[in-house]
Image (cartoon, rainbow, N blue to C red):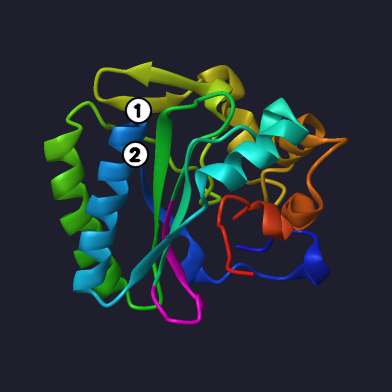
Amino acid sequence: MVIAGCGGATQPESARTVAAFEVPLPSAADRDEFLSVLRAAAEVEGMHVDATSKVELESEAKVSPNFQMTMNATVWRSSNDSEAVASAMDQFDHLGQVWLMFSRGEDPAMAVRFRKRAMHEIMLHWPSTLSLPIMPTGSIPLHRDLVRTPTGYRVNPAEAHKYDGSSGHDSHRYLEDVLERLPTPPASRISELLPYCWQAASTPRRA
């Protein structure tokens, strides 16, 4: 997928989102247990999980209410954090409802094994987990553009045009999201506002 910005960089096919779910994690105990489940599934494949600390999340939330999060975690395939296989995060408009997103990965077979193992345990622990729609561009609609159903979310038909990919990327979604975040993002998160980087803005990296 070609996304404007960042020198016209192309998002690798391995980074495309292939499955996404909303997991209800309303309490700190739920979130701790979820991370334990994710780490256990990742370790089987030789991967690891990095999660932003509660102190860091609270610090960023003080800058702007739009930066509120209770979780921001990433599953990395390599020791140098070069490939993100999955990410888990919530945002100010769905706090406690963590979105878990899986990428195709550079090793799709391994990524599928990990996803199946993780989701098996997650569904046992949180059976009310719901699927999220993935649009043609590989992105997930904004929370306000989703409609909840008993079996999962779907995009509101009235908002679907924002995500049809006709411009090569979700420009409408991008502009809406960035305008909400401005004008006071933390210096450490300025890069998230660039179009290409914004696609993976939830991915925490080691300093």
Which residue is tagged 2?
Answer: 31
Up the image or down, 120 lies above or below 43; here it is above
Q: What residue is at 55 percent from the left and 35 percent from the top?
A: 69
Query: Dots 1 and 2: beta carbons under 8 Å?
Result: yes
Up the image or down, 84 lies above or below 51; here it is below
Quadrant of the rendering where the N terminus is positioned: bottom right
Q: Position of residue 198 (x, y in %)?
A: 68, 52
Label 1: which secondary element: loop
Label 2: which secondary element: helix
The answer to which quarter of the image holds residue 205 is bottom right
| Prevailing SS of the magenta stretch | loop
The answer to which quarter of the image holds residue 197 is bottom right
Query: Any magenta on residue 79?
Result: yes
Which residue is tagged 1?
Answer: 27
Q: What residue is at 50 percent from the left and 81 percent from the top?
A: 80
User: Magenta part of the protein: which range?
Assistant: 77-87
Q: Position of residue 86 (x, y in %)?
A: 40, 58
CA gap, disc 1 and disc 2: 6 Å
